[in-house]
Amino acid sequence: MRFSEEQERRLGALGATDEMLQADFPGEKERNRAYQRLESGLAAEQVQRLERFCEGPRRPLLLELEERLSAALREAGFLQVRTPIILSRARLEKMGVFEGSIMEKQVFWLDAKRCLRPMLAPHLYEYMREIGRLRPRPIRLFEIGPCFRRETQGQRHANEFTMLNLVEMGLPEGTDLTARLRELGTLVLDAAGVSGWRMTDEDSTVYGETSDFVDKNGMELASSALGPHPLDAAWGIMENWVGVGFGLERLSMAVSGERNIAKVGPSLSYLDGIRLRV
Ligand code: ATP
Ligand code: MG
């Protein structure tokens, strides 16, 4: 006899491994006794983890990554920007996201003309143009901040998550953009401490053909795009560029080995993956 669904959920929240959850018992009495033992052991472990957390990092890995990655990118010459979380419908449409499209169905609308941004790209496009008017090439920019998408929430998707989007524009003619993309991906993934990642080819609803960065289990960590791109004209951009968007919660999962995004993202139930309701 296996653990009940409710028992499995509770044990999972407390960090039980698959092996623990798949245990089989001769009867209900044995199973419930094993559950009690496992539950109290795991609960005690959460309290110990909280103690280590208070003595050590004192903040979730997500926030540490945000600081480490932004320092690494500024060091590499990138300017950090902060743009509004509220995005206009007009700018979203300039990204090719129109009513009825797949991406539009994922958008949280505030009213007829404004939404919570599902991506950072539209506001970065504005910065590329404005900074591009004022500064020599290459232009290097990034933003880290919350994005919102209506998702049927699985293990790897949250409605609210943290994106890191970087872009480098105006590279010397003849630059191998894919090689540069790999370099920039390596910079971020090394700074995050992700090992065993690789690049793959993907189809994006917004950008068409793109390269993704995936972790050793095939989980998507980032998607990229290269310019010149058909979307550029609407934004007044006429140069080559390399852009990548990373999900910080996905990076946090890849680094910590945590398989449920709910444990690493913004949360009231978990602090750095530690279950608080024990
Ligand atoms: P997926 O295929 O995993 O749904 P996506 O291709 O729709 O992701 P992109 O638009 O490429 O996502 O966004 C860039 C990155 O942002 C993704 O590679 C991922 O790391 C992260 N991301 C996207 N959507 C979510 C989400 N709902 N929750 C957490 N992270 C996300
Ligand atoms: Mg993608």
Image (cartoon, rainbow, N blue to C red):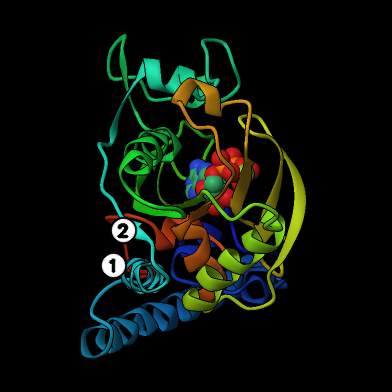
| SS at circle 2 | loop
Q: Is residue 123 above or below residue 109?
A: below
Frontmost residue, 177 versus 217: 177
Frontmost residue, 204 versus 268: 204
Q: Which corner quadrant of the figure contains ligand 2?
A: top right
Horizontal arrangement in the rendering, residue 217 relative to residue 121 (left or right):
right
Quarter of the image containing the N terminus?
Answer: bottom right
* Disc ID at residue 178: none
Q: Is residue 273 above or below residue 151?
A: below
| Amino acid type of the residue tagged 2 in the rendering | Ser
* Disc ID at residue 276: 1
Task: State yes or no: discs 2 and 1 in contact (Cβ < 8 Å).
Answer: yes
Distance from Cα at disc 2 to Cα at disc 1 = 6 Å
| SS at circle 1 | loop
Provide residue 85's location: percent of width, then percent of height. 28, 36
Horizontal arrangement in the rendering, residue 40 relative to residue 86 (left or right):
right
Q: Which residue is mark 2?
A: 269
Q: Residue at x 67, y 57 (%)?
A: 175
Q: Is mark 2 within 8 Å of ligand 1?
A: no
Frontmost residue, 188 versus 47: 188
Provide residue 184's location: percent of width, then percent of height. 56, 65
Q: Is residue 155 visible?
A: no
Provide residue 135's location: percent of width, then percent of height. 34, 49
Q: Residue at x 31, y 9 (%)?
A: 112
Q: Is residue 273 above or below residue 107?
A: below
Provide residue 162's location: percent of width, then percent of height. 39, 51
